[in-house]
Image (spheres, coloured by chain):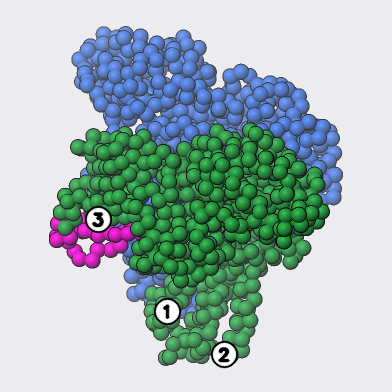
Chain colours: A blue, B green
Amino acid sequence: MRASQMNFNSRIPVKMAFMVPIAALLVVTQAFAQGAAAPREIDVAPMPALVQMGSGSLPITAAFSVGITGQEERRLHRAVERLLRNLGEQTDEPIKTGIADPREATLVVHAEHVSQNVQAVGEDESYTLDVTSTGARIEAPTTLGALRGLQTFLQLVEITPKGFAAPITHVEDKPRFPWRGLMIDSARHFMPVELIERNLDAMEAVKLNVLHWHLSDNQGFRVESKVFPKLQALGSDGQFYTQTEIRDVIAYARDRGIRVVPEFDMPGHSTSWFVGYPQLASAPGPYAIERHFGIFDPAMDPTREQTYRFLDRFIGEMARLFPDAYFHIGGDEVNGKQWDANPNIQAFMKAHGIGNDRALQAYFTQRVEKLVAKHHKIMEGWDEILGADLPKDVVVQSWRGQSSLADAARSGYRGLLSFGYYLDLMWPASQHYAVDPMADGTATLTAEEASRILGAEACMWTEYVSPENFDFRVWPRAAAIAERLWSPESVQDVDSMYRRLGVLSWRLEANGLALSSAETMMLERAAGTTDITALRVLASAVEPVKGYMRYQLSRAEGIEPSNLDGLDRLVDCVPPESETAREFAEKVNQLAGEQFHDGEVEGALRAQLETWKENDPKLQPSLQDSALLYDARSLSAELSALGDAGLRALDYVDKGERAPQSWVTQELATLDAAVQPKANLLLVVAPPVRKLVVASAGGNAPPQ
Amino acid sequence: MRASQMNFNSRIPVKMAFMVPIAALLVVTQAFAQGAAAPREIDVAPMPALVQMGSGSLPITAAFSVGITGQEERRLHRAVERLLRNLGEQTDEPIKTGIADPREATLVVHAEHVSQNVQAVGEDESYTLDVTSTGARIEAPTTLGALRGLQTFLQLVEITPKGFAAPITHVEDKPRFPWRGLMIDSARHFMPVELIERNLDAMEAVKLNVLHWHLSDNQGFRVESKVFPKLQALGSDGQFYTQTEIRDVIAYARDRGIRVVPEFDMPGHSTSWFVGYPQLASAPGPYAIERHFGIFDPAMDPTREQTYRFLDRFIGEMARLFPDAYFHIGGDEVNGKQWDANPNIQAFMKAHGIGNDRALQAYFTQRVEKLVAKHHKIMEGWDEILGADLPKDVVVQSWRGQSSLADAARSGYRGLLSFGYYLDLMWPASQHYAVDPMADGTATLTAEEASRILGAEACMWTEYVSPENFDFRVWPRAAAIAERLWSPESVQDVDSMYRRLGVLSWRLEANGLALSSAETMMLERAAGTTDITALRVLASAVEPVKGYMRYQLSRAEGIEPSNLDGLDRLVDCVPPESETAREFAEKVNQLAGEQFHDGEVEGALRAQLETWKENDPKLQPSLQDSALLYDARSLSAELSALGDAGLRALDYVDKGERAPQSWVTQELATLDAAVQPKANLLLVVAPPVRKLVVASAGGNAPPQ
């Protein structure tokens, strides 16, 4: 553990961090004494801070029950009932969902103190969990910690050769960072309440504790305001959350130990406000809801007092609606064009010695911060708010990177990292997993400065995400980030992470997320049939283009993307990361490591290559017939060509022949074409096939 | 069309069967005049009676709308709104769900008359549907026919190279049989209301019009009785439908043009009644809810007047709850043991000249029929009620076959076929499809007798079916039976049927059925991860054992199956019919037909065989780790062996060599072992692989 974190942890007082009951320790010791040494890893994500495994397990049958001792808190009861329900679904055992007498219960949950009424940043989430062959026990300083322990217990239950069971284990656990968030953008595409709720379930499963809810942007204003009803009436196409729904979501989140921080983006990203209230803007209206994506000119007028009177009343209303101590005002990406073009604003700047747009935004931010504080909230904003001189309790969320985050910390502000955690960029989980809030720019912070890094948030911007594919765009990758934020920094094994994400994903899906079921549905729609075996072969070999390339490719073709466009093409049906490609690449590397002599690995590669090779004739007709798949025709042909190239390469290697240069040249040209994006997709199996072709030419092949 | 049917149809007056408006015909004629001749088949199931296809299509966009002229009936409005919602989901177009002004609507629905308050057997279901390049029109004598037309229209909408569209078509349609049912057994495993409702949606899609609801059996009494509350209180484990729920389901069904016929099985299959009311039984209690399957001794005492007093009040209560004209009293499988052992019953029989148990049941049936008639219902029962002399309006449901059905018809009773339509037997869809109510035993009926065959019912008995896998156990196979009952007898193309079932299945799944999503969830549970690629390879190559073999295999192993057993093994996760096996077998036949010289077909076969061959090493560890998959270990190994055998066989054929006899002998022995059931599964890809091996030996191979 790094010094910075030691310090970090020390500023969040952990009252009873390692409260291991003597009895439990004795049992664990005994288990280890009996046991086969070095038991395998548990399949829990995020990985707890300390895990000691015994040998043997606690069988989970229909008789499983949970009792509660210690503090009574209704949400703990509900959490236990939820655990029992989930366990019943996951094991298909008819487990009863009532709370049992703790003297007879299989699992006893003991919380020493009740939680705070409104969950605070840094509230104790620690717990210990002991599983023996006859029962289990969770102990925690607070009910919040007990909730975390319940999720760990649920994930311990696994299928074994003898039925469902939880391995004998001793767990001591607490989070590395106190602020572990997921940002959901409900503005670009509106996300229904049931989607938010099932994602809160998933967040609870991986111990994320903040829903950062991006509720307004150019493309929509998504909350009912009773004070300014034209915000939602004219700014949302009818797609907004009522205040009752907001309260329900907040209660739902609190039940799961999750804070809800609302974001109302200002002074930019605010076109939707101006449809109903054009007087807020820096240029005359009328305004219409924005359908396109990018940075737009409309911005609030920071020079008129009526803007602040409006915001005072608005923030007051929302501060009452959202109980959390923090209030996010956005503050990002103001291009200043409306300000530059408005003579009144220019005159105001001159009169007040405000030299540029940056300074004008700083003035706005300071004014808004006072309003936020007046309504008893702590302000949060994106990097750009840093331009202003603000009270030191303000939290800066960095989308620009650790250096920007470090700047904030050095200036005395607290900060959150989001750079590197943008789920809309379609990175593989491993890439997010490698990002650490305390690395790179922040690595050189003093201990005190480092202690200001509260944590981080995964962000899902929804320009290209609909309610249909939201879940599989976010999960399981968000869980890799959740592990980075909860688990000790030393937890770094990428293979283990992927393996555990596979286990976690089925639990999340059993718990209501639309992962593979949604992919299947969308593929079936595109094909118009359930007979999608060949389509799946192609779908599993591609990934959506990365970063902002989809947007750029559209614009390069002269098409301005819009949130009215359907998200129902092949690119929308496939997950961000191809499991097939990852496994295929791994096998190619294994084979190379084995000097191309592992029959089993080669056999598996050949089966895969053969499947690709034979796929195009089967698939091509249905691609031709479907407007949703039409642009994937050449990808399918290329996949078959890749299959053929890989098989021939293996043939040369097997025969000990060097592949003829003419063939190699031709195949490499084909492969170069294959890695170009098509239909906003990348044929991600091309690079490992390239490796086979190069090896067959004696190129990177290991010495014979 | 056969004479028998002509007669059949003539007894159901079709008021306006072929009401094609002149305008529509002109348009169709025009379309054909323009068009490319012989357009392809439409993807609708069941296939309408008459389809004329034009060229071109009606684009379906967000602007699509529906207007209603003619009769106003609330359920027609709701059906249109449902159509619009389903269409929006299936096309991902933001289609508005309100009813449009018919002058501006894309589709106009016109019904001449409202429907009857309680849907009658033989009520007119005919309609015509015309799709032109600018709009569509449904005309029907009744709103019931309009509902049928809406479902045809919905199924016409398909993805095309230019987006979603409905082909230009003229359809004239009406059912072949007036009674087209699905029986759901809610007794052996209780099926929740939402499952019943989503299955009613699926029934509507394929124009089935009767839900025959098997509501009581030895294993449970599933309806709330207010008169005899101990029926559900002691006979259901708390798993029963309240009367409010029953009314909701009936209204839900009526909205979809579906009658609900309740079945309360008596005098046998009635143990659950006796838990609360042992005085009804023929032997003293106490009784417990039966957990096992089969034919059991408990039967009502037909000799005591109190039995009939009870049934009078009970049937009266249920006759008020269920508005349908028909009331099913079961009547099947009484073994008579309790009767034989009861001296009072024996004395009664002697006193009344009742010579045997069959005669005693006839006496009971006659008494019960009078009670049913007293409460204004027409009695229905299984074959066994035929023993009694009954009024001629009684309907006999035949589980024994067409001969039994023909006997009923010759005796003047009306009848329904269920033999050949038992979905729990795990037959392939093609096998059910080949069964015809008017074939075999019924083929020799006179026209008048034949006219008594009202139709048929698919039956799903649920000994081995849970709410988790119910949908994919029933669908899409039930749709093959629905087509047999709706479409003209001449509709017989099995390949077309399978292709259209694939299209239908995605629509059903988009509409809420748990088909592939449920399979995936169950496979993931069994594997404990979403990484189930290798498990899917095995799962797609097997089918559950057929007929009653699962029950027989259990008992042969000394295990008495129970409805408390989990249904979560591999056999429970796989659909009744393997698409992969069917397609593989087809390709083997194609290759044989091509004298083994079709490179594309052979390539596809090799890819599949290679995948199987390489699968076991990948899959075996997770089979070993899971109690739910453990017994499938040898299947996995055998599948790999099959893959290897098939590849070698193709090698011999390709080289023009005759495979060595020793190898062939050995492989055939392996194949013989592979076709034996294991883990209640059949490796259904073994027979086509066997064909390859035999061909490689020069056996059944075509002459070179």
On the image, numbered disc 2 is attached to which residue? B660
On the image, numbered disc 3 is attached to which residue? B169
Residue A170's tag is: none
The type of residue carrying mark 2 is Pro
- At horizontal 72% and vertical 26% (from top left) the residue drawn is A111
Q: Along the line of sight, which residue is nearer the eye, B302 or A136?
A: B302
Residue B231 shows in this picture: yes
On the image, numbered disc 1 is attached to which residue? B591
- At horizontal 64% and vertical 69% (from top left) the residue drawn is B677
The location of residue A452, given as percent across then percent down, is: 55, 25
Q: Mark 2 or mark 3, which has the lower sequence index? A: 3
Q: Along the line of sight, which residue is nearer the eye, B226 or B344?
A: B344
Tell me where the magenta segment starts and ends, as one range.
Answer: B30-56
The type of residue carrying mark 1 is Leu
The CA span between labels 1 and 3 is: 37 Å
Q: To which quarter of the image does residue A282 belong?
A: top left
Between circles 2 and 3, the one closer to the viewer is 3
